[in-house]
Amino acid sequence: MLTAFARKIEIDELGDESKTSQNTYWYCSDSLNWEHNGFFAKPFHWCWRLSWHGQHICSLAYAPQTESLHLYRGSELGKLKADPSPGILPLNNSRLLIKG
């Protein structure tokens, strides 16, 4: 599996530019041919270092607009969701507590 944080830039007919960034992933089943499998997490949430724990995937995601971290969990990448509690973890705190 290969993951990346990709940026898409679109220009409309008036010449206005819009940017979107999102995590994306590819799978390779035969060590030669890679297939794009979609996107995961919210746009502009950069997931770091995916980690598997049993049947679940976990990742912390950085959101630059709010300078915060979000805990993501799911059973597969396409279903990875931000944990609703506590929701946002401000980066300006000296301690980071994740309740399980």
Image (cartoon, rainbow, N blue to C red):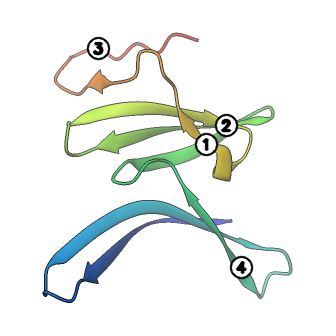
Q: Residues within 10 Å of mark 2 (few under 14, many from 20)?
A: some
Determine the secondary structure under disc 3.
Answer: loop
Determine the secondary structure under disc 2.
Answer: strand
The disc, 3 or 4, on the residue closer to the chain's N-terminal end is 4
Query: Front-most of 39 and 29?
Result: 39
**Position above or below: 81 against 44:** above
For badge 4, the amino acid type reads: Glu
Count of picture labels: 4
Q: Quadrant of the C terminus?
A: top right
Residue at x 60% of width, y 66% of height = 25
The disc, 3 or 2, on the residue closer to the chain's N-terminal end is 2
Separation of residues labelled 4 and 1 (CA atoms) = 19 Å
Q: Which residue is mark 3?
A: 95
**Position above or below: 90 against 23:** above
The label on residue 74 is 2
The label on residue 80 is 1
The disc, 2 or 4, on the residue closer to the chain's N-terminal end is 4
Query: Front-most of 58 and 15?
Result: 15
The reply to whether dot 4 and dot 1 touch (C-beta < 8 Å) is no
For badge 3, the amino acid type reads: Arg
Rendering coords of residue 94 (x, y %): 21, 16
Determine the secondary structure under disc 1.
Answer: loop
